[in-house]
Amino acid sequence: MLRSGLCLIPVLVLILLQSGISAADSDKRGAIGVRISTMGFGGEIALPLSSEISARLGVDIFNYKSSTEIDGINYDIDAALAWLPLLFDYNPGRGAFRLTAGLIVSMNNVKLESSSDEAIEIGGHTYTPEEFGMLVADIDCRAVAPYLGIGILKHIPSDGKVSIAFDIGAMFQNYKLTLTHEGGNIPPLIEEQFMADLYAESETVVNDMNRKFGVYPVLKIGISFGI
């Protein structure tokens, strides 16, 4: 996922540079800002495209560790998240209200691990810790996710100095994963059954993730400085 995201960075930079040329031609100033949100901590640069439309390119970073239960199995989540949003704001009538749409490049590293001292059910059959060892899944998500939202106040200060802005929106994501196991000793007689159960459990886990996080809520507050 990191490689896919990195390949798209030059495209985003070119788009924003073109936005900057348009802004320079119209003799309007842009802004740089910092923000905190449900996507973590980040910063961005904003440039005007017209009197009512502006473009923003940012970066958000978020490290997350937690645990969750899926299909009766406890998993530890270790996530190193990084996003590159390319967003376009529309201020109808040049007012404080904004409509926002754009794309978010994901460069995330998310891992699930499950180890247990007791027997657990995997895909409809029960296995002991000595058999399955530890369950592991590396999660892959869509490289580019669409974003839609609304906002209050502007990311480019009207007076050219400082502004505070609020955003509410959603990123539409899709996840894939393959569940494997590390360690353990599966008896040869049930190895084929175990692999089929592991695949079935993978489908259960990914369906749960898409149900819970397929529409990722985004709440932001940021402060911007005119440039």
Image: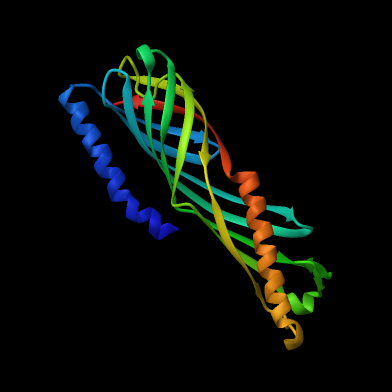
Q: Nearer the viewer, residue 179 or 155?
A: 179
Q: Nearer the viewer, residue 181 or 117?
A: 181
Residue 188 vertical placement versus 48 (above, below)? below
**What's the residue at 38%, 18% (across, down)?**
91
Q: Position of residue 88 (x, y in %)?
A: 36, 30
Residue 160 occupies quadrant = top left
What colour scheme governs how the chains and residues are painted in the rendered image of this protein?
rainbow
**What's the residue at 49%, 54% (across, down)?**
108
**What's the residue at 71%, 82% (across, down)?**
191
Residue 75 occupies quadrant = bottom right
- Name the side, left or right, on which 116 lies relative to 41: right
Count of numbered labels shown in the rendering: 0
- Name the side, left or right, on which 45 lies relative to 83: left
Q: Position of residue 184 (x, y in %)?
A: 72, 80
Residue 155 occupies quadrant = top left
- Name the side, left or right, on which 167 lies relative to 44: right
Q: Position of residue 105 (x, y in %)?
A: 42, 47
Q: Nearer the viewer, residue 153 or 190?
A: 190
Residue 199 vertical placement versus 158 (above, below)? below
Query: Which part of the image, by quadrant, shows the C terminus?
Result: top left
**What's the residue at 31%, 44% (across, down)?**
12
